[in-house]
Each structure stands twice: as C-alpha cells, then as structure tokens.
C-alpha cells in the first residue's frame, strides 16, 4: 500500500501514534476480509462489503495523513 510513501510510512510508524493506530486497524480489517473470503472466518457477503468500506475509509485517512506529512516535510 502506497509504495511511493514507503520511507514516510516507516518514519510515521515510529513518530505518529494516530497513524500507527489507523494503519493497524486497516491491516486488521484486511486480514479479517481475507479470512472471510477464504471461509476461514464466517461472514456474509454483506458483512464483507461493510468491512471493505471501512477499510477503504481507513486507507483514505492514511493517504490524507501521508500527504499532509509530505507537505510539511
């Protein structure tokens, strides 16, 4: 995710608690979605769709944080 921001992500993961929280929530949702789609965890198509929308919102938030951090650097 966001390979063009790899170095900035590494930096923010050590300096920005909010970024780490959002980043971790995004990754947790990603794994949960994969598990549901692989039938490792139970989930209806509707539940998976809701989780995908939450994950996308978190990704948008991460992108906003990265853009602001880049502009401030």
Image (cartoon, rainbow, N blue to C red):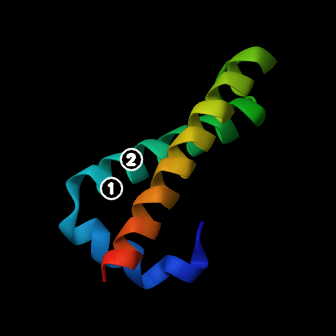
* Horizontal side of residue 43 vs 17, given as left or right: right
Marker count (numbered): 2
In terms of secondary structure, where does tag 1 sit? helix
Q: Residues within 10 Å of mark 1 (few under 14, many from 20)?
A: some
Percent x, y for residue 58?
51, 43
Circles 1 and 2, Cβ within 8 Å, touching? The answer is yes
Percent x, y for residue 7?
41, 84
Q: Quadrant of residue 13?
A: bottom left
Can residue 44 be seen in the rendering of this structure? no
Q: Is residue 20 above or below residue 73?
A: above
Q: Foreground: 58 or 36?
A: 58
Percent x, y for residue 32?
58, 35
Q: Quadrant of the C terminus?
A: bottom left
Residue topped by disc 1: 19
Percent x, y for residue 44?
75, 15
Q: Is residue 30 above or below residue 47?
A: below
Can residue 71 be seen in the rendering of this structure? yes
Q: Residues within 10 Å of mark 2 (few under 14, many from 20)?
A: some
Residue topped by disc 2: 22
In terms of secondary structure, where does tag 2 sit? helix
Distance Cα–Cα, label 1 vs label 2? 5 Å
Q: Quadrant of residue 38?
A: top right
């Amino acid at each position: 995710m966001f390979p063009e921001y790899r170095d900035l992500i590494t930096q923010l993961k050590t300096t920005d608690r909010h970024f780490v929280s959002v980043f971790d929530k995004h990754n947790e949702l990603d794994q949960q979605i994969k598990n549901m789609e692989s039938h490792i965890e139970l989930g209806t198509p509707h539940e998976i769709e809701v989780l995908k929308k939450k994950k996308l919102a978190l990704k948008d938030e991460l992108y906003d944080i990265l853009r602001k951090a880049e502009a401030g650097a």
